[in-house]
Amino acid sequence: QVQLVESGGGLVQPGGSLRLSCAASRSIRSINYMGWYRQAPGKERELVASIISGGITNDALAVKGRFTISRDNAKNTVYLQMNSLIPEDTAVYYCKARTSYSDPVYWGQGTQVTVSS
């Protein structure tokens, strides 16, 4: 079992920044895959960025150069630094974890990000 809790969402003006946090209930050293996904109203959930235990990251084209995913093993936390935010970034952001391909997928409850002037 892995429990995930997201935080850091809120209302921000275009061009602003936010940092999202995903805290895991156990050591993320044992979680091979972690990622951030988002879902806007009326749209499907989509990948934002992911990171694996070796440190390799993958970013969606829509956020490339603006968002950065990172992990702090000592704090059992994965972060998403979001800069140069635009209204199209408005969505509920979810954290995903998978210890291995043979194990279940775990999701957090999500945190709302709203970009508006």
Image (cartoon, rainbow, N blue to C red):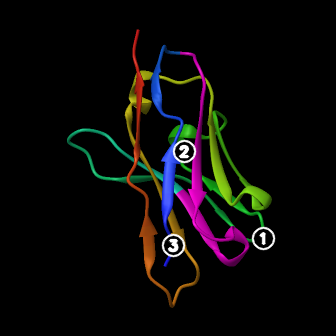
Across and down, in percent, residue 113 comes to: 43, 32
Q: Which residues are magenta?
A: 15-35
Q: Quadrant of residue 8?
A: top right
Going by the numbered disc 3, the residue's amino acid type is Val
Q: Earlier in the sequence, mark 1 or mark 3?
A: 3
Which is nearer the eye, 94 or 66?
94
Up the image or down, 38 lies above or below 2; here it is above
Q: Which residue is mark 1?
A: 54
Pointer 3 local density, CA inside 10 Å: few below 14, some 14–19, many at least 20:
some
Q: Earlier in the sequence, mark 2 or mark 3?
A: 3
| The furthest residue to the bottom | 102
Which is nearer the eye, 13 or 30?
30
Up the image or down, 79 lies above or below 9; here it is below
Q: Which residue is mark 3?
A: 2
Going by the numbered disc 1, the residue's amino acid type is Gly
Q: Residue at the spot x=39%, y=31% of the render?
A: 90
Pointer 1 local density, CA inside 10 Å: few below 14, some 14–19, many at least 20:
few
Q: Which residue is mark 2?
A: 61
Magenta stretch encompasses residue 24: yes
Q: Quadrant of residue 43?
A: top left
Magenta stretch encompasses residue 28: yes
